[in-house]
Image (cartoon, helix red, strand yellow):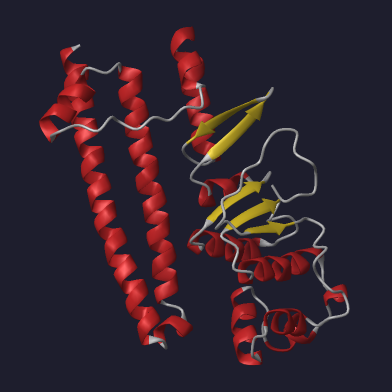
Amino acid sequence: LVGEREAEGRVKIGSRVKIGYFSQQHEGLNPNNTILDEISYTYGLSEETARSYLGAFLFHGDDVLRRIGELSGGEQARVAFLKLMLTGANFLVLDEPTNHLDIPAREAVEEALMAFPGTFIAVSHDRYFLDKTANCTLVLNQGTITEYLGGYSYYLMKKEEESSRPQEQDQVSQKKKIEQPPAQKNNSHRQSSVSTLPTGRRQEMIERAEAEIAMAEAELKGLEYEMNLPETQCDPERSHTVAAAYAEKEQEIIQRYAKWEQLTEVDDAASARS
């Protein structure tokens, strides 16, 4: 994805995708720069703006005048992560982003990711971090990929459920295939169609609806965070745009909950009949 190794297969990246990469080694930092210079010069920021961003990542007062080469691994990670967030990338690739971080720094990174409006993919041994920030878990095993629509604890729960099912159901649940319900002419036709589906298929649709709700709610949190930024509140046009997007996202969530309720009602009724 980041071009460090030649792909054995085919990688197709959309024309509007801008990738940002967080490496454990933090190669992009200049050890001779101060923290303030590393942020302000790289992105052409005023000292006031740079200090504001650095404050969000727990660098305050004279801390910003320390040189990069003098920082601990965790402090360098915070600077590198802030630089990544300022690149304008909409797809982040994160290699162990919470390594060397203390609890306050880890929470700052988690909050930044939860407010991030784009997509990120992370490799991490930090299960708490994965549970808090991820809404999808990808499991790679012997050349196959399995997708679980939740964090690490959700993945463990689903694996436990799968191990207790009959072999046939277990094989179906491990396929990486998430289908959308077919378009129908009216709601009653849709409900009737869904009710005739196998139980496992109905459960897949419900889980997909729940994942869509989780993603929409995460996007709503990102918009709420953006609305509260000082630079947004000082810009009437931007404030109006973000507020409109927030209201639109709220309506989307209401509709997604309605869809989820329909699916669960149909599933309950079908299960009762069987």
Residue 118's x, y, as percent?
51, 58
Q: Is residue 236 left or right of residue 164?
A: left
Where is residue 68 drawn, in percent x and y? 83, 75
Q: Quadrant of the C terminus?
A: top left
Q: Is residue 271 visible?
A: yes
Q: Is residue 7 placed above or below 230 in the rendered structure?
A: above
Q: Is residue 166 visible?
A: no
Find residue 125 and report its horizontal and vertical position in percent: 68, 43
- Does residue 186 appear to the left or right of 248 in the view shown? left
- Of 192 and 262, nearer the camera is 192
Quadrant of the rendered image containing residue 81: bottom right
Total marks placed: 0
| Residue closest to the eye, 20 or 261 | 20
Give percent across and percent down for residue 102. Answer: 69, 62
Displayed quadrant of residue 222? bottom left
Residue at the front extreme, as displayed: 15
Look at 70% across and 33% down and name the residue there: 9
Report the residue at 66% width, 52% height from top. Answer: 93
Q: Is residue 242 above or below residue 217?
A: below
Horizontal arrangement in the rendering, residue 131 relative to residue 46 (left or right): left
Residue plotted at (50% across, 33% down): 148
Q: Is residue 67 left or right of residue 175?
A: right
